[in-house]
Image (tube, coloured by chain):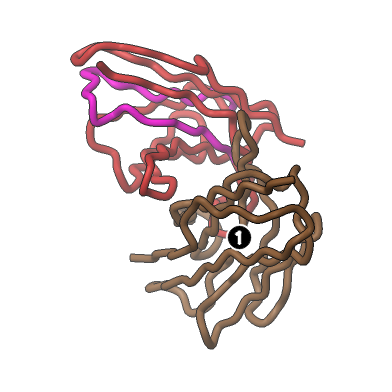
């Protein structure tokens, strides 16, 4: 089946430093799956950070970026300068398509701690 | 912004106990999901539904039942709870199937089975 492998936490970065959280995927039933990054802040549910549904495109939100690379089957999350408020758990996810039966496969999550 | 509310936030029960986790969404989304989150695993799908009265089996359904009573309400039932079901449970909703659509999550229910 589909799978997502990502950097697992904990990840500790100092404020204003750069960040990369790696994500690679394997999709068995569709050549170009939909790719997502979700984030879970302490005490909250997951929320969508960004998504890209077209291979080769880049998604961005709140200073984070991720590029859908079909050659390397990767979707790494990057930020040039992190803030304390970015401390959270980040999940890479893959979706096969649309409609009935479509669902997401999630990575294990990477807990990011940004130190002041 | 879609709102998904789970209750209770925390629950402790004993082995063999009967537990019901509740989820309500207020955006009239068609799809609702129950996931569990355990250390060392990604979110794993237990059951999902695409409308009132509909139920679909997810990837880890053993030991769980679910019921979608209305468009808004989706319940997860553990009729004979076991310690292996100690976990953080998330409910989510989406307008269409979750392969491309954004999922909106509740804040989670932490269940402990002693």
In this rendering, the answer to whether A43 lies above or below A60 is: above
Q: Quadrant of the C terminus of chain A?
A: top right
- Residue A86: percent from left, percent from top: 71, 47
Lateral position of residue B29 relative to residue B65, left or right: right
A23 or B24: which is nearer to us?
A23
Rendering coords of residue B24 (x, y %): 58, 23
* Residue positioned 71% across, 77% down in the render: A57
Residue B18 counted in the magenta span: no
Which contiguous range is marked in magenta?
A: B72-93
Residue pointed to by mark 1: A36
Location of residue A17 by image quarter: bottom right
Q: Which chain is red?
A: B
Name the chain letter of the residue that bears numbered label 1. Answer: A
Image position of A67 with respect to A103: above or below: below
Which quarter of the figure is the N terminus of chain A placed in? bottom left
In the figure, the brown chain has which letter? A
**Residue drawn 29% across and 29% down?**
B85
Residue B82 in magenta stretch: yes
Residue B72's image quarter? top right
């Amino acid at each position: 089946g589909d799978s997502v492998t990502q950097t697992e936490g904990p990840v500790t970065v100092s404020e204003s430093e750069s960040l990369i959280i790696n994500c690679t995927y394997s999709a068995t039933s569709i050549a170009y799956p939909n790719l997502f990054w979700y984030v879970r802040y302490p005490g909250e549910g997951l929320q969508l950070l960004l998504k890209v549904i077209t291979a080769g495109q880049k998604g961005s939100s709140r200073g984070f970026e991720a590029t859908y690379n079909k050659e390397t089957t990767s979707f790494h999350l990057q930020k040039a300068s992190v803030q304390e408020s970015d401390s959270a758990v980040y999940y890479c996810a893959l979706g096969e398509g649309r409609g009935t039966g479509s669902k997401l496969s999630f990575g294990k999550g990477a807990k990011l701690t940004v130190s002041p | 912004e879609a709102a998904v509310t789970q209750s209770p936030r925390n629950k402790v029960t004993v082995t063999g106990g009967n537990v019901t986790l509740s989820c309500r969404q207020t955006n009239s989304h068609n799809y609702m999901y129950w996931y569990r989150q355990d250390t060392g695993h990604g979110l794993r799908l237990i059951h999902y539904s695409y409308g009132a009265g509909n139920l679909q089996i997810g990837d880890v359904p053993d030991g769980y039942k679910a019921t979608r009573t209305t468009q808004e309400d989706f319940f997860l039932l553990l009729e004979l709870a076991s310690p292996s079901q100690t976990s953080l449970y998330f409910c989510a909703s989406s307008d269409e199937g979750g392969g491309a659509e954004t999922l909106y999550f509740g804040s989670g229910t932490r269940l402990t089975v002693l």
